Amino acid sequence: MSAAITVRSCDLLEDFHACVALQREIWGEQDLEVEPATLFVVAAHTGGQVLGAYDGNALVGFTLALAAVRNGAPFLHSHMTGVRANYRDRGVGRMLKLFQRDGALSRDIRLIEWTFDPLEVRNAHFNLNRLGAICRRYLPNLYGITTSPLHRGLATDRLVAEWYLDSPRVVAAVSGSEPAPSSLCTIEIPNSFDDWKVGDLPHVQSMQRAIREQFFEGFAKGYAAVAVSKTSDASRYHLAPWSDF
């Protein structure tokens, strides 16, 4: 991680436009699916968060969160987090999330949620192992079929990450202690999945449906996805009773 990288709140129109430009660069979506600068303005002025990671004066990552309420309790929905390609694996995403956590706790907000693609196991490792989030909900094709080249025509299935900011699990994770992958059941994602995405979309779609059903079955039993482990041939989600966390 570069010592020059800093994280701060974005408050100016020029900050928001820079976030939109970086969004276009990262996801490559068509204009209809790009979140406009006005959404960043609204989030920043209505209790949400817009945070930027900067290398000097250059924006290299951002996160956009919206204010939300469930059962009378406030939380943040972290709608979008992106890091410029040549700054990934340098701790920028973690810096953004920890700054986001500190800001939420300072306002007595104890939960942040976001969604992610269950097939992207690197994201799953970051969310569950490194941050201590858990997942209890699976949303099939949440955004429909998009123009993003990252999705490759697949349904936009999403897991909902629940990040309980001051829970013992999260406190341990952000201190560097990853959870042990003990579980009652596992869901396997073959390491060859990314290759299949490129050359065998029907096969990937079939496997996506099978994985979706396994998550539905596990969540219906009261389990949560709590960790990810990796072997030479596959990555595995570990599910355990969510009441334990």
Image (cartoon, helix red, strand yellow):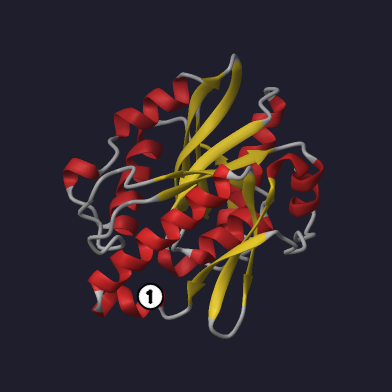
Where's residue 162, x and y in %? 60, 40
Q: Residue furthest top?
A: 72
What residue is pinned by disc 1? 194
- Whether residue 229 is visible, yes or no, is yes
Where's residue 159, x and y in %? 48, 48
Work out whether 163 lies above or below 122. above
For this view, does 76 lie left or right of residue 180?
left
Number of numbered discs present?
1
Dot 1: what SS?
helix
Work out whether 161 lies above or below 184. above
Tell me what residue is drawn at x 56 percent, y 46 percent. 219
Where's residue 223, x and y in %? 64, 47
Tell me what residue is drawn at x 35 percent, y 45 percent. 18
Tell me what residue is drawn at x 44 percent, y 69 percent. 86
For this view, does 22 lie left or right of residue 68?
left
Q: Quadrant of the C terminus?
A: top right
- Whether residue 91 is visible, yes or no, is no
> Of the residues shown, which amino acid type is indicated by label 1?
Asp
Q: Residues within 10 Å of mark 1 (few under 14, many from 20)?
A: few
For this view, does 168 lie left or right of residue 48?
right
Q: Is 32 or 234 nearer to us in this picture?
A: 234
Q: Quadrant of the N terminus?
A: bottom right
Where's residue 194, x and y in %? 38, 75
User: In which image quadrant can residue 147 be found?
Assistant: bottom left
For this view, does 141 lie left or right of residue 137?
left
Q: Is 141 or 166 nearer to us in this picture?
A: 141
Work out whether 199 lies above or below 121. below
